Amino acid sequence: MSRVHATREAWSPQTKHDYDAILRELEVVLASPHFCNSKRYPALLRYIVESTLTGKFDQLKERTLGVEVFDRPPTYDTNTDTVVRYTAGEIRKRLLLYYSEHNSSAGIRISIPAGSYVAEFLHGHDGHGDSVDDTELQAANANEHEKRQIPGLFAEGQEAGINTEAHRSGQASGADTAARAIKQAARPARVAWRLAAIAMVIVAAVAIGAVWRLRVAPQQSPMDAFWGPLVRDQHSVILCTGSSTFAPNNYSGVTTADKSIEYPFISMQAASAISQISGTLEHSGTVTQLMPSATTSLPDLREHSIILLGGYNNGWTLRLLQPLRFHFLPLTRTGGETIIDQQQPQTQWERDTSQPYFSADDYALVARFRDPTTDGWVVVLAGEGRNGTEAAAQFVTSPHYMDLLRQSIGSGFASRNLEAILKVSVIDGKTGAPSILTVYSW
């Protein structure tokens, strides 16, 4: 019985045209609805495909992918943090969905086989006209199986044939045999020396290139170092801001607006902070999407890097800061807004409620960290009051203050998680210059 069908075979690119074809297919896949609305899936798939094409297979391991793609520390626990495995599984599923909707026997398909992080490229072949007999196929498979079970069978047969022919033709002279033996023995030594010489040349070239890159690479500015993890490979960042409603009996005159408030508002200080942050990120080509915290969902936060603006009027600020060393105490545990040091609970920062709100010094918390809940980078700019929030925005958009922060953090400033407590002078409701009280990084 014969059968005719279309097949796909694993295919290795050989020419620049082949490589370009795979990269074009990658861009088409990433632009599809299965990938374009995510940041994690395209990042991992692109890294895997490009590393496979360039032969960097040593980088296609779970820990390395976690460090290079998802900014995990080199010592992170892959057993508890399964971001690479989970994301790769989702990519496999989405590739299957994509190609099921774009079914064609021709062209290139990208695949990541289960149990591996090395990309596989499948090339379609039209099977029409190729008739395969099932009986012949089974016989060929059985024959191949027998070859694998008896690996020396055919080698022995060939050797026997050669010996028979040699017997018929006459034996070679002893001198010729000895010469061939010496020549064959010397060949591996020559090959080894050549390989060693090539390896030395490659190592020297790599070392020279590394030194050259270090000499010519421009030093990263403190501003770029602070915002780099957040905006890396991001076209848009969510700016999630708290909102308020009037509450004349409260110390600040306002209270947090929830979903039930039809017309919440933000203060002039919050508007100033939004303007400063948006303007700063615009220079890096990143657009900010303004969203109120009351209606921002966890899926929104998981698909983007996030800036949380505001302290007690932003529920996401209170929630995501809670596990960190510096965070806001719930209002139910204190008479006013308070920032606490979890390692030293006796250390607290709070406004002097004996002073009028418009003239009491404020405090702010600035944080940048990778959050396990959202699996992304988060920046928090949160004052106990609105003046502190405005000062926090001034702080992270000022090259001067970012340079002071980098000096306080030291090495690894561009990739470390960090928190800083600021003090802010307030005069007649106007926000003064912030000053750094303490810094913590990990």
Image (spheres, helix red, strand yellow):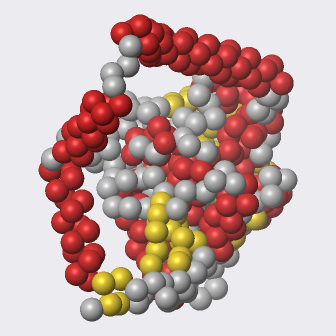
How many numbered discs, if any?
0
At 74% from the left edge and 23% from the top edge, which residue is drawn?
209
Residue 360 seen in the figure = no
Of residues 231 and 40, the one nearer the viewer is 40
Q: Work out whether 309 lies above or below 415.
A: below
Judged left or right of residue 327, residue 25 is right
**Is residue 10 shown to the viewer in this render?**
yes
Rendered location of residue 113, percent (x, y): 38, 61
Q: Residue at x 57, y 47 (%)?
A: 51
Q: Nearer the viewer, residue 76 or 355?
A: 76
**Residue 39, horizontal then vertical, whole percent:** 57, 63
156 over 105 or under it: above or below = above
Q: Is residue 437 above or below residue 381?
A: above
Question: Going 50% across and 49% down the picture, which residue do you hit?
Answer: 70
Q: Quadrant of the N terminus?
A: bottom left
Between 98 and 352, the one lying in front of the other is 98
Q: Position of residue 270 (x, y in %)?
A: 71, 62
Vertical comparison of 48 with 99: above or below: above
* Residue 276, quarter of picture: bottom right
